[in-house]
Amino acid sequence: MKFENSKYYNTINSKKISFPFGNFYLSEYFIVSEINEGEHFDSNKIQEVIKCLFEHYDKNFQIGYISNRVNSYSSDPLQWVKVNAEHNFILASAIVIYNDFSFINATIEKNLSNKSIKRCDTLDQAINWILNIKEFKSPLHNFKTL
């Protein structure tokens, strides 16, 4: 299910940023990415997204990342390892998988990452998991699980 078709789209305050290679939805606690069918989400595209993130959020933001894999695309999981090492703004990630191939890729990413990554069957599961990670349980973060 695409984020715009979910119950969250109209209940969570988010900003949609569209790129030629996919859409990103920026909310207070998480980002949802939906990369277009057949794209290769390479380091140049990742840097383009990161630039927009730093323009949108405060300088030292910490956020959850949800990869909503509604389409089939490719990426180099080591690029995300480099992004995390360089910028360190992703607290944890959830990957919403819709087929066995996505599950295999998500497993590889999980094994390469030093951050917590959860493989999820639904967008609902991913959002609720991200909202309940311990880093958001601090007094600085007040939210209600949807």
Image: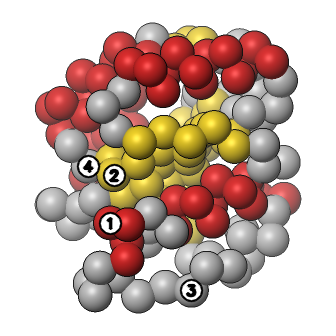
Relative to 119, residue 136 above or below: below
Q: Nearer the viewer, mark 4 or mark 3?
A: 3
**How far apart in space, not on screen, are marks 2 and 4 (Cα)?**
6 Å
**How far apart in space, not on screen, are marks 4 and 1 (Cα)?**
12 Å
**Is residue 70 toward the left or the right of residue 53 in the image?**
right
- Mark 4 sits on what residue? 89
Q: Secondary structure at mark 2?
A: strand
Mark with earlier residue (1, 3): 1
- Mark 2 sits on what residue? 91
Image quadrant assignment for residue 72: top right
Q: Secondary structure at mark 4?
A: loop
- The amino acid on which the numbered mark 2 sits, given as a three-letter code, is Leu
- The amino acid on which the numbered mark 1 sits, given as a three-letter code, is Glu
Q: Is residue 44 visible?
A: no
| Circle 2 Cα neighbour tier, 10 Å, few/some/many (<14 / 14–19 / ≥20) | many
Residue 135 has which mark?
1
Relative to 91, residue 14 above or below: below
Please report contact status of discs 1 and 2: CB closer than 8 Å, yes or no: yes
Q: Nearer the viewer, mark 4 or mark 1?
A: 1
Point 68% across, 79% down: residue: 146
Residue 144 has which mark?
3
Point 33% across, 51% down: residue: 91
- The amino acid on which the numbered mark 3 sits, given as a three-letter code, is Lys
**How far apart in space, not on screen, are marks 1 and 2 (Cα)?**
7 Å
**Is residue 61 toward the left or the right of residue 75 in the image?**
left
**Is residue 96 toward the left or the right of residue 100 in the image?**
left
Residue 23 vs residue 11, the one in the foreground: 11
Please report contact status of discs 4 and 1: CB closer than 8 Å, yes or no: no
- The amino acid on which the numbered mark 4 sits, given as a three-letter code, is Phe
Point 58% across, 21% down: residue: 107
